[in-house]
Amino acid sequence: MNTVTEAMRGEGTRADEPVGLLDAVRAGRTSEVVSLLDGMTDAERRACLPELKALRKELRTARWTAESRRALPALHAAGAACQTGAAGVANWLAATDLRWAQASPRLLLHLLGDRDPRWLADVAHRLARRPVTARVPYELMAGLVRLAGCPVPVTDAYVRGWLDHIDQGWRHGGTKLDRLRRDPHLVPLVAALMETDEVGSRLEWPHDDGPDSWTGALARLADEGTLDRGTLVDACVARLLRGGSAADQRVFLRLLDALALTRAEERSRVADWLALASDAVSPVAAHAQSVLAALALDGDLTTRRLADMSAAVLFRPEKKLVRSQLVLLGKVLLRSPGGAPELLPAAAQAFGHADAEVQERALKLVERHLAKLDSPALRGELALSAEQLIPSLRERAARTLGLGPCLGEPVVHEEVLPPVPEPVRLAPPPESAAELAEEIGAVMLSGGDVPSFERALDGLVRHAHRDRKGLVEALAPVVDRRWWAAAPPVYGIRPADHFGPEHRVLSTAAEAFDLLLATLHGTVHTPALRAAAADATRGHAEDCVHAPLARAFDARLWEVAHRLRTDPLPFLLSTPTWSTGLLEPEVLVDRLVAYHRLGARPAEQDFAQALLRVRRADRATAEHAAERALALGTAEGARLARRLTSPPAEPAGHTRREGALILVEIGEVDDVPADLPAAPRSLGDPVSVSMAHRYCHHWSEEIRPHWLALLPERREAVAARFLWDLAALAVEDSRGAGRLLPLIAESGGEAGPAVHLGIAYGLGARHAEDRLAAVDALLTLTARGQLVPERLGAALGRLVRSGAVKPLRLAESARTAAATGANSTLWGVLRHTLPVLLADLAAADGARPQRGLGDLLAVAAACAERSGAQGELPYLERTVARRGSSRLVAEARRLHRALTGEAAA
């Protein structure tokens, strides 16, 4: 026995049980731990493992303490050294609870380096198979591979670790090319790299093709013969064919360019280029198109293949690709007139393109080469294709190409709108506590929409009243995952401090349920709940525009939490009947009857929310429910009866300019009863433009759909408070607020200036998903018969003119809406937008139009053509008379022809 082991023995210890290791691990004395482990036999190491596992379990519940931070690196090393099985070592090294404070790879390799090479290889490959999120250090995996002398693992985690290792090698000098040349496993790792998903962003820096870039280094290695050129080209093309993110496609396209394929290599991959031109992202498709174009002009591409390529490319939405393809067809037809029978029908497929300019280019190409086509059957095929042309071009095709009078017959437009969305009735809350716990957990993870949140909230209140102990037991798996359930508190924040008056704003559904679950769990003290519930109702002179919405929503939740502790409610009065937040009056009366029968005391904020949600639009139903409520003989019944019999009053609002923005000011909302508590009563406070300059800490967009459900029949009052957020979509290029627009369109009440302005800002949003949401809201409002086209059109004109909305973004939104078939709707809007913009051009000769105005005119012309609109448009003739052949002038002439019924020249 060596002297180290002798020194470790203590009085009363078995001969095979070394001591001192656990104390060194607890103290974080890593060098001492290594010395002790180096002097142990395998049996002695195994004897230490149970105590190390017990220490790990102990530290797992207190991982943020100073003791844990000190001990974990030493524990990580000692546990790995005392394991005997490869699976056990790999599991210990990659364990989640040990991940944030690991031992260094060099130390671990020292402790494990004396094991059998096959055992080391097994550990290395097990670690490499872990997901990237396990964060196993590459230096550890590579060191084990080096010690084992085994084949390199080509897993996702290993390859990504290798990428980082090569990228960070600049610290040791040399270029990336030098580091790759020295790598003994270069060939298998590069092969694996070409098949690893989402690595483009890791490879694209720097953007040049020099020896310190990935593309430049790999291309140089292929030229040198270190990497097989043919294999690398095949892998690169296969990667492009596979598709992927824009970053991935961009970097592999750069690599393909850097490899500089020969003409023979390009000819051998014609099928690949055709597939890429058809389906790849635009930059890759453009590259494939250029390769195929060169082959076609050199006679290396058959007419049949060129026709197939054209059929695919002309179907794409990118106008640049389509125009290039039409130019290519024109060049080939000039060189090889005999290809007309196959190429002209292919070119005619562009007659169905969404862009009228593309249609006209295709028609000109067919007109120019039609004489080379003498087959009646092929002319008939062109005639069928010509029916897809816009009306003016269809008439021109009938007149100049002699393709039959049927093409000149007008097409009756049929407006296509989405079905009117129907609200969804909320299902009853879950009967079992276990099912309720699952739903609450799902809402906390996903954020939850209004129906799922309200259903889970009502279920929690019901089960807490019925069987509090059973509910707490069922919620244990959910509570165990919450930060406030940890002991000691995470980051030193005590739950009692967090759930108090200073932190009363509930920004997410998860925070709302955290408050309620912490209350049930006994983590929050009753005085804190009482103080927070009282403080949540108070306003401040400098409240931001969202404050009344947040305060009304939060006050009910704090009140529910307080009642959970002091006087549990049997159920909530304010749970909506419908997904929009509406509460049926008969349902509310039934709930008051049940409260009266149970002798339950209604919660003030909950009942106030019920009054704001109760449906009054159906006057007959409301008056019948009012009679029943009055017959109860209770104060709540009388208040409900007054609410149901009072006629709904819409808020009076007017627009006001604030810099580039147009906002809506609303006076006091008379429809909010004066006898409500302070928090919900503040929903009737005026909305002024000055609120835009106040500090706002309501950063979460997740909670805002719940605010809309506070006043489900008064969306104009809520939309006015959301208008700052919606304006930021277009002016500040923010993201996400657009998802409110479809909910606003589906809500109830008048669609006034705030609703229309919100949609206008959404149509000019920076991000496509917000624009799409605005289009959805526009079509929904139209389908419900609530859109005022002149109001929306005039608002768009003013916003474009002020610079708040960019014409190009608006044109994209309008094109998307028109593509659904709502051409009359869009023309009804744009006929009020365009005069405002064209007036500026008419006011001064030579005035420069805004970028994108031509695109907006193109959409308007398409809508006018398809809907058969006629009449005059102010200032359009002045635009038509402008000199030049710009897109603006061309589209203005097209719109003028459509409105006057003239045929295209």
Image (cartoon, grey):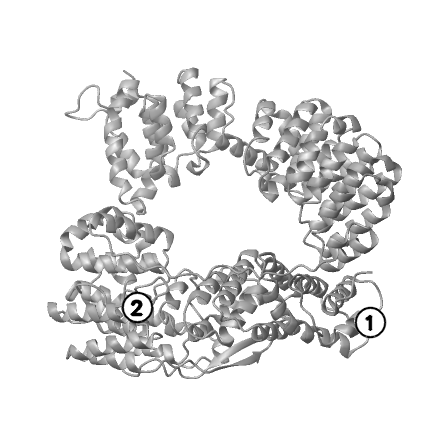
Q: Secondary structure at mark 2?
A: loop
Find disc 1 in the rendering and name its residue.
881
* Label 2 vs 1, first from the N-terminus: 2
11 relative position to 351: left or right? left
Three-letter residue code for mark 2: Leu
Quadrant in which the N terminus is drawn: top left
Q: Can residue 375 be seen? A: yes
Give the image location of residue 342, x and y in percent: 78, 36
392 or 220, which lies in front? 392
Give the image location of residue 167, x and y in percent: 59, 37
Going 46% across and 72% down the picture, which residue do you hit?
719
Going 60% across and 25% down the picture, which residue do you hit?
186
Residue 174, compared with residue 323, is above or below; it is above
Q: How many marks?
A: 2
Residue 733 picture quarter: bottom right
In the displayed image of the protein, which residue is found farthest to the front?
A: 405
Quadrant in which the C terminus is drawn: bottom right
| Number of residues whose C-alpha sits closer than 10 Å to that of mark 2, classed few (under 14), some (14–19) or many (20 or more) | many
Q: Secondary structure at mark 1?
A: loop
455 or 891, which lies in front? 891
Three-letter residue code for mark 1: Ala
Label disc, if present, on residue 594 of the rendered structure: none
Going 33% across and 29% down the picture, which residue do you hit?
78
Give the image location of residue 359, x and y in percent: 74, 52
169 or 499, which lies in front? 499
Q: CA distance from mark 2 to mark 1?
A: 58 Å
589 relative position to 146: left or right? left
| Number of residues whose C-alpha sits closer than 10 Å to that of mark 1, classed few (under 14), some (14–19) or many (20 or more) | few
Give the image location of residue 554, x and y in percent: 31, 68
702 relative position to 820: left or right? left
Find disc 2 in the rendering and name its residue.
583
